[in-house]
Image (spheres, rainbow, N blue to C red):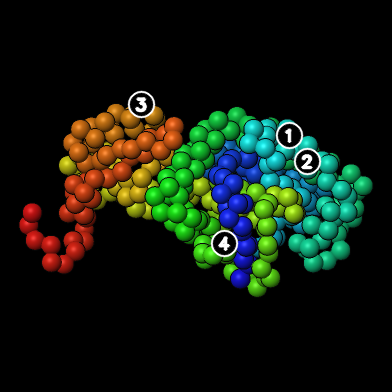
């Protein structure tokens, strides 16, 4: 197992954050694979054609994505963890351009396990790699970044709430496939057969992103990051529709919202999951709140909504399966 040992001081300084560069790399991975999270399907359909044209006309870019995105491997020089909370995309991209040629070639060759193709032997490999990321940001992510950032930050609010109520084990377990908190300062980050790595006092970041599995990132020995899937973008409400009887009783939108509140969520997350506007979601939440089917609590600057026991019971009774031993109420 891949295990990171984290000191108490470093753990106390760990934080959740978002990164425009990380989200750009996640977008590039989605465009390259032609597969996105449920919450990003419309975005993928809108941009995948232009991306394929861009790649077809640039042999360097085509070779780069083939080498950088391998099964269970992502070239680390493309995703250095942000070095300060207010880092912009330009700030982060500057660090990619500053990567040494040796490091960039090493990262790519590890992924392929073979000598690099001629297209990637360019002396300006880091700079040209940054150019591709800049194109992805400018043409596919930048206009959508305000919405993405709201959704990602809503996920962070929910994670922070889990941390406050249940500790690190609650917040980190199953954050990404193969990851769980083992206690005693040990974080299992994957299931690979790797030696334990001591992070000492290096800051640890948890970066929400529109990625299916996530990845690990570091600028050893100064900073480490875990990139994890944003739950609102990962979830697909169509796979767990509200019970038909509940939809008839409350209306389809309120039924969907109530069903989604099996775990606390912010209005921003509900907007991302349902596809309805803020005004519509807010209005339906007010009705459910007045009916005492949902409650709300503040977490930092955000508000989280959750099902009350009455809401839980209503969803349960209207579902197709009723637990044995439950009689009339």
Which residue sits at x=27%, y=45%?
Answer: 307
Where residue 167 sits in the image (x, y, percent)? 45, 54
Q: Are marks 3 and 1 in contact (CB under 8 Å)?
A: no
Q: What crowding class fits label 2: few (fewer than 14 Cα within 10 Å), some (14-19), or many (20 or more)?
A: some
Q: Mark 1 falls on what kind of element?
A: helix
Q: What crowding class fits label 3: few (fewer than 14 Cα within 10 Å), some (14-19), or many (20 or more)?
A: few
Among the two numbered marks 3 and 1 on one chain, the one whose residue lies closer to the N terminus: 1
In the image, is 113 to the left or to the right of 74?
right
The foreground one among 270 and 228 is 228
Which residue sits at x=58%, y=52%?
Answer: 11
Among the two numbered marks 4 and 2 on one chain, the one whose residue lies closer to the N terminus: 2
In the image, is 153 to the left or to the right of 203?
left
The foreground one among 186 and 310 is 186
The quarter in which the N terminus is drawn is bottom right
Residue that carries the numbered disc 3 in the rendered image:
279
Query: For residue 185, which numbered disc appears in the image?
Result: 4
Question: Quadrant of residue 117 in the image?
Answer: bottom right
Q: Are marks 4 and 1 in contact (CB under 8 Å)?
A: no
Residue that carries the numbered disc 2 in the rendered image:
95
Give the Cα distance between marks 3 and 1: 35 Å
Which residue sits at x=27%, y=39%?
Answer: 295
Q: Is residue 189 above or below residue 90?
A: below
Q: Are marks 1 and 2 in contact (CB under 8 Å)?
A: yes
Residue that carries the numbered disc 1 in the rendered image:
91
Q: Mark 3 falls on what kind of element?
A: helix
Which residue sits at x=29%, y=47%?
Answer: 259
Q: Nearer the viewer, mark 4 or mark 1?
A: 4
């Amino acid at each position: 197992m891949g295990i990171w040992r984290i000191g108490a001081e470093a753990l106390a300084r760990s934080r959740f954050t978002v990164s425009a560069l990380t989200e750009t790399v996640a977008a590039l991975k989605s465009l390259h694979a032609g597969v996105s999270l449920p919450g990003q399907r419309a975005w993928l359909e809108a941009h995948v054609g232009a991306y394929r044209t861009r790649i077809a006309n640039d042999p360097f870019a085509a070779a780069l994505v083939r080498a950088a995105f391998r099964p269970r491997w992502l070239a680390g020089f493309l995703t250095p963890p942000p070095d300060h909370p207010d880092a912009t995309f330009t700030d982060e991209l500057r660090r990619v351009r500053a990567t040494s040629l040796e490091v960039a070639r090493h990262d790519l060759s590890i992924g392929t396990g073979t000598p690099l193709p001629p297209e990637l032997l360019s002396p300006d490999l880091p700079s040209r790699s940054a150019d591709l990321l800049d194109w992805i940001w400018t043409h596919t992510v930048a206009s959508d970044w305000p919405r993405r950032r709201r959704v990602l930050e809503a996920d962070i609010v929910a994670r922070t709430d889990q941390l406050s109520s249940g500790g690190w084990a609650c917040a980190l377990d199953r954050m990404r496939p193969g990851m769980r908190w083992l206690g005693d300062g040990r974080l299992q980050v994957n299931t690979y057969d790797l030696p334990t790595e001591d992070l000492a006092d290096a800051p640890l970041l948890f970066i929400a992103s529109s990625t299916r599995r996530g990845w690990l990132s570091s600028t050893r020995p100064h900073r480490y990051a875990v990139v994890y899937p944003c739950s609102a973008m990962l979830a697909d409400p169509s796979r767990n529709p509200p019970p038909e009887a509940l939809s008839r009783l409350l209306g389809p939108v309120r039924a969907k919202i109530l069903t989604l509140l099996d775990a606390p969520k912010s209005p921003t997350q509900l907007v991302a999951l349902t596809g309805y506007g803020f005004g519509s979601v807010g209005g339906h939440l007010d009705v459910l709140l007045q009916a005492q089917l949902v409650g709300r609590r503040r977490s930092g600057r955000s508000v989280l909504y959750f099902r009350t026991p009455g809401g839980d019971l209503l969803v349960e009774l209207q579902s197709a399966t009723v637990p044995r031993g439950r009689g009339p109420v």
